[in-house]
Image (tube, grey):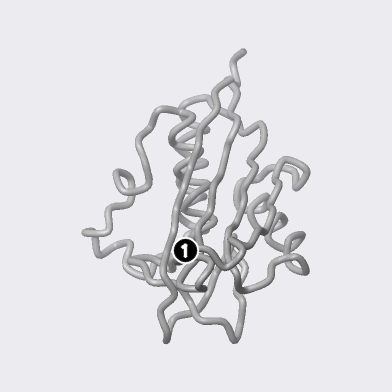
Amino acid sequence: MRIGFGYDSHRFESGRRLFIGGVEFPGETGLKGHSDADVLIHAIIDALLGAAAMGDIGALFPDTDLRYKDADSKALLKDVAAHLDAALWRIGNIDETVICERPKLRGRIDEIRSSIASVLGIDVSQISVKGKTNEKMDDIGASLGIAVHAVALIERKDA
């Protein structure tokens, strides 16, 4: 077994759609980024790649590559899952904490969990998502952006 940690943060940017865990939040200001800026999926990607010692999101999907401009982060996550599968790793579980003042996630957590599980081809019980505020402290607390921490456990398929 191996454990990986992932982190990502993005600032809000008007004129963009907001995606968190592959779920769109209509009416909310989106996040600035080269791809669709899905901060939750980006943190998961880094956690999975880190656990497998395969680098990070920037190495696999560089923001200098126009192929990833406005890319759907779910497609990037699916690609990472294929890399893990080819290297004989399977996902044990993933745990994420989304830190933001807005939007409120409580009513959409199950939808986010289902979205991630579907992309990865795993059971929803293997995904945990928690929403926290930063109690109005720092840039996240001032609603300037969103940050996510993610931990992933992977296991060898041949073990």
Question: At which x and y percent is residue 52?
Answer: 46, 28
Q: Quadrant of residue 91?
A: top right
Q: State which quarter of the image contains the N terminus.
A: top right
Q: Give the farthest residue toward the top.
A: 159
Q: Amino acid at mark 1?
A: Asp
Residue annotated with mark 1: 138
Question: At which x and y percent is residue 72?
Answer: 46, 65
44 vs 18: above or below = above
Residue 90 vs residue 64, the one in the foreground: 64
Residue appearing at x 63%, y 62% in the figure:
133
79 vs 155: above or below = below
**How would you rate the neighbour count of disc 1 (Cα within 10 Å): few for under 14, some for 14-19, many for 20 or more?**
few
Q: Is residue 76 left or right of residue 132?
A: left
Q: How many marks?
A: 1
Q: Please tell me whether mark 1 sits on a helix, a strand or a loop.
A: helix
Residue appearing at x 33%, y 62% in the figure:
68
96 vs 86: above or below = below
Question: At which x and y percent is residue 119?
Answer: 61, 52
Residue appearing at x 51%, y 64% in the figure:
146
Q: Is residue 15 left or right of residue 155?
A: left
Q: Is residue 155 left or right of residue 145?
A: right
Q: Quadrant of residue 156?
A: top right
Q: State which quarter of the image contains the C terminus.
A: top right
Question: At which x and y percent is residue 55?
Answer: 35, 35
Residue appearing at x 62%, y 48% in the figure:
96
Q: Is residue 11 left or right of residue 20?
A: left
